[in-house]
Image: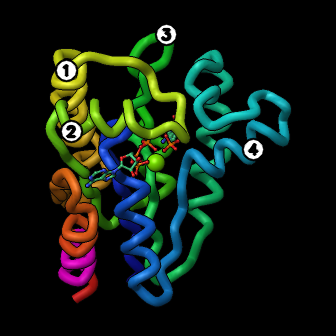
Amino acid sequence: MGLRVIIVGVPGVGKSTIVSKVVSSISGARLANFGTIMLEVGKARRLIRDRDEIRKLPVVKQRQLQKVVASRIARMKDSVVVVDTHLFIKTPEGFWPGLPFEVVRAMNPTHLVLVEATPEEILMRRTSDASRYRDATTIESLAEELGLAKSFLAASSSVTGAPVSFVRNSQGKADEAAMRLVKVLEAASR
Ligand code: ATP
Ligand code: AMP
Ligand code: MG
């Protein structure tokens, strides 16, 4: 059976940094960055030009893109598929699930992994990453989002039956976090 691992965590926690290291170290592993595919589809439909515009679209439009992306990922048949995505999206209409029932069931994950860091670390990473337009935030609201993430994660695990692991991405230690994620995948493929 193939591995289909969904990696989640709040914006700026370091998912893409870790996942790219992991995928390049496992032969046959395929990276599916949900946001990158959403951007491709959204650009083709002339809805957006940048990945940080996606979450500002009306939720009905985001839902259409989300469904298309989930079904594309569902068709990936590689032996290891690592999906880099979000448990929830902070939209102007409220916190919206990144993995609602039909989306997470379509992608059919074998494992779920939450990348974690402290609110202070996440805030620093968001502020210092000039390549993205992440929303300004405070330590207090980040702490709330980290709590919210656990609720959304429990829902995804219950719906899919996939086990949950936690990978801590400490400051300056992305390589170590990537190694811990590789260990989770190794245990999963035994
Ligand atoms: P998003 O959900 O918005 O795509 P992300 O979780 O994928 O965010 P990254 O883009 O991987 O986050 O990382 C955000 C910033 O934090 C980047 O500038 C990255 O270089 C930096 N970063 C990632 N991990 C660490 C770490 N362990 N220590 C210091 N900086 C880090
Ligand atoms: P990322 O680079 O991971 O931040 O992805 C870019 C954008 O894609 C995010 O800010 C969201 O707007 C969108 N996105 C990513 N994953 C999902 C998802 N599972 N559901 C809905 N939107 C998503
Ligand atoms: Mg990312």
Q: Which mark is residue 9?
A: none
Tell me which amino acid carries mark 2: Glu
Q: Secondary structure at mark 4?
A: helix
Q: Which residues are magenta?
A: 181-188
- Report how far apart the C-alphas of labels 4 and 1 lie in the structure: 33 Å
Residue 35 placement: quadrant: top right
Q: Which residue is mark 4?
A: 41
Q: How busy is the neighbourhood of tag 3: few (under 14 within 10 Å), some, or many (20 plus)?
A: few
Hey, what amino acid is under mark 4? Val
- Horizontally, is 68 left or right of 47 in the view? left
Label 3 or label 4, whichever comes before in sequence order: 4
Provide the secondary structure element on which disc 1 rests.
Answer: helix
- Viewer-proximal residue among 144 and 67: 144
Q: Is residue 111 magenta?
A: no
Kind of residue at disc 3: Glu
Viewer-nearest of discs 4 and 1: 1
Q: Nearer the viewer, mark 3 or mark 2?
A: 2
Marks 1 and 2 in Cβ contact (< 8 Å): no
For badge 1, the amino acid type reads: Ile
